[in-house]
């Protein structure tokens, strides 16, 4: 944004990085100043842990945001988990998001993964949004064949607004 300040230090100490930003008030476009900060730690082989917090004061009702995540890779497995929270000054506008996923490299050429996420709404008139996805890919030389199946229930908190999608692709690299 206009006059925004952003700082990142990727070498604070072994495996620790820090990021911070500040956006000053802009009168009509930015009601109050906003600030954000985050840290990430990668000092253990295969492990990444991160957390961030901030505020969005671009509207009359400010929103406090927090995010925490962890990913771990060991041999052919990768797992991840994320939790985010959005706390608004507006009544019944809070949202909590959680996601987790796992992937497995079956071989050098084939991978499969499964992921799921949920958005929980403070507003009791909204249903929790739930999403799942499964994907597989196979590579042979310069050719990659991939497929996925995804579904989302209660989109944006609207009960019975459900959608599914399926895809398959064949790509060639020259």
Image (cartoon, rainbow, N blue to C red):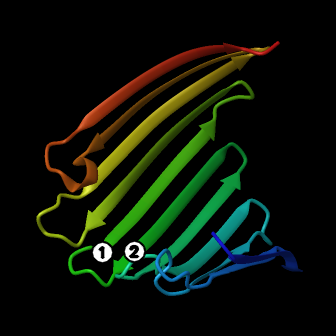
N-term mark: 1 or 2: 2
Tag of residue 94: 1
How far across and how far down the image is residue 141, in percent?
A: 79, 14
Tag of residue 86: 2
Q: Quadrant of the N terminus?
A: bottom right
In terms of depth relative to the viewer, which is nearer, 151 or 91? 91
Q: Quadrant of the C terminus?
A: top right
Q: Secondary structure at mark 2?
A: strand
Tag of residue 10: none
Q: Quadrant of residue 92?
A: bottom left
Q: Quadrant of residue 98?
A: bottom left
Residue 131 relative to residue 75: left or right? left
Is residue 42 in view from this perspective?
Answer: yes
Spatial separation of the CA atoms under disc 1 and disc 2: 5 Å
Residue at (39, 64) in percent of width and height? 97
In terms of depth relative to the viewer, which is nearer, 103 or 145? 145
């Amino acid at each position: 944004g206009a006059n925004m300040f952003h700082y990142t230090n990727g070498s604070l100490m072994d495996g620790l990085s820090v990021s911070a930003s500040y956006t000053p008030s802009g009168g009509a476009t930015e009601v109050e100043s906003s600030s954000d900060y985050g840290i990430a730690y990668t000092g253990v082989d295969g492990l990444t842990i991160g957390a961030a917090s901030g505020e969005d004061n671009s509207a009359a009702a400010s929103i406090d945001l927090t995010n925490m995540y962890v990913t771990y890779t060991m041999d052919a497995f990768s797992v991840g988990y994320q939790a985010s929270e959005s706390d608004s000054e507006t009544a019944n506008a809070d949202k909590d998001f959680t996601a987790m996923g796992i992937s497995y490299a079956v071989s050098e050429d084939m991978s499969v993964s499964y992921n799921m996420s949920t958005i929980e709404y403070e507003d009791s008139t909204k249903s929790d949004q739930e999403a799942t996805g499964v994907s597989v890919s196979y590579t042979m030389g310069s050719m990659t064949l991939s497929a996925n199946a995804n579904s989302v229930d209660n989109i944006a908190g609207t009960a019975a607004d459900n959608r599914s999608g399926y895809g398959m692709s064949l790509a060639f690299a020259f």
